[in-house]
Image: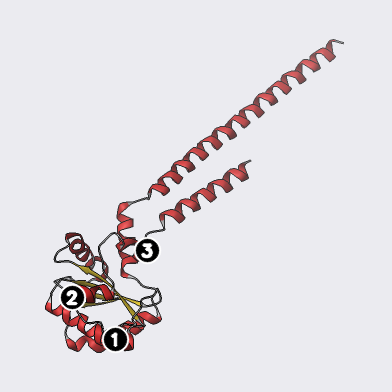
Amino acid sequence: MKKKFILLSLVLVMMVLTVTGCGKTGKEYYAKYKHLNFKEVLAAEQFEDENPDYEESDDQAIIYLFRGQGCGFCRNFITFLNSISKEYGKYFKVVSFEVWNDADNGDLMSKMPAVTGVEARGVPYIIIGDKVFDGYINSYDEEIKAQIMKQYKDGSYDVFDELAKIESSFNGFSNTAVILINLLVMVLGVTFVTLNSNKNKKEILENINRINTRNTKREDSKK
């Protein structure tokens, strides 16, 4: 019984640790914020699409773009992406957050330096993998293309995954974790009571046997 009790406790502890260690993925994190893909950004900024065959997939490097509608430097960056989309379009996709007219997106951008370590002083604020471009000028072009290819080859790092982990650590246990912890406490309590109850029953039976044994000996001695 004790072995089963210990095993059950270990299993429940592992369940709690597993659940509390899980956080949102990057995509799940930013899903609640209004965002546009590359073609939607081109349309919003009234660009002519230079690559009608452009498509997005899960394998592409993500370019996170915080922008302001009509921002000149943002438009310059979008122009650059548009110009390389035929050659590099299969390697990247865009997740864009407009911050001038969307307060929630503005708050989101203000959170990014906690992960990137780069102050968000304005737009465009561009994140590709672990690299941040705070603003855009033409001299960044080759570095941006190199970073796109680096992230395309190894997309294991996502800045929003990291942001979700940070916020999760501050928010504490998830509701599921709390439920599991309560369940663990209940099971441990019931098991403890059961073990003590069985122990008490055993002691009572042993005492009864001792009394019966003594009485039997007394009866035998009288004979």
Q: Label 3, label 1: how many angstroms apart (C-alpha)?
A: 25 Å
- For label 3, the residue is 25
Q: Residue furthest top?
A: 222
Q: Label 1, label 2: how many angstroms apart (C-alpha)?
A: 22 Å
Q: Amino acid at mark 1?
A: Lys
Between 87 and 25, the one lying in front of the other is 87
In the rendered image, residue 106, in percent from the top left (x then y), is placed at 18, 63
- For label 2, the residue is 45
In the rendered image, residue 55, in percent from the top left (x then y), is placed at 35, 78
Q: Inspect this view and state whether residue 118 appears.
A: no
Please report contact status of discs 1 and 2: CB closer than 8 Å, yes or no: no
Location of the C terminus by quadrant is top right
Q: Secondary structure at mark 2?
A: loop
Q: Label 3, label 2: how many angstroms apart (C-alpha)?
A: 29 Å
Q: Is disc 3 surrounded by few (<14), some (14 to 19) or many (20+) residues within 10 Å?
A: some
Instruction: Say whether disc 3 or disc 2 marks the residue closer to the N-terminus.
Output: 3
Q: Amino acid at mark 3?
A: Thr
Location of the N terminus by quadrant is top right
Instruction: Say whether disc 1 or disc 2 marks the residue closer to the N-terminus.
Output: 2
Q: Is disc 2 surrounded by few (<14), some (14 to 19) or many (20+) residues within 10 Å?
A: some
For image coordinates 69% across by 25% down, the residue present is 205
Q: Secondary structure at mark 1?
A: helix
- For label 1, the residue is 145
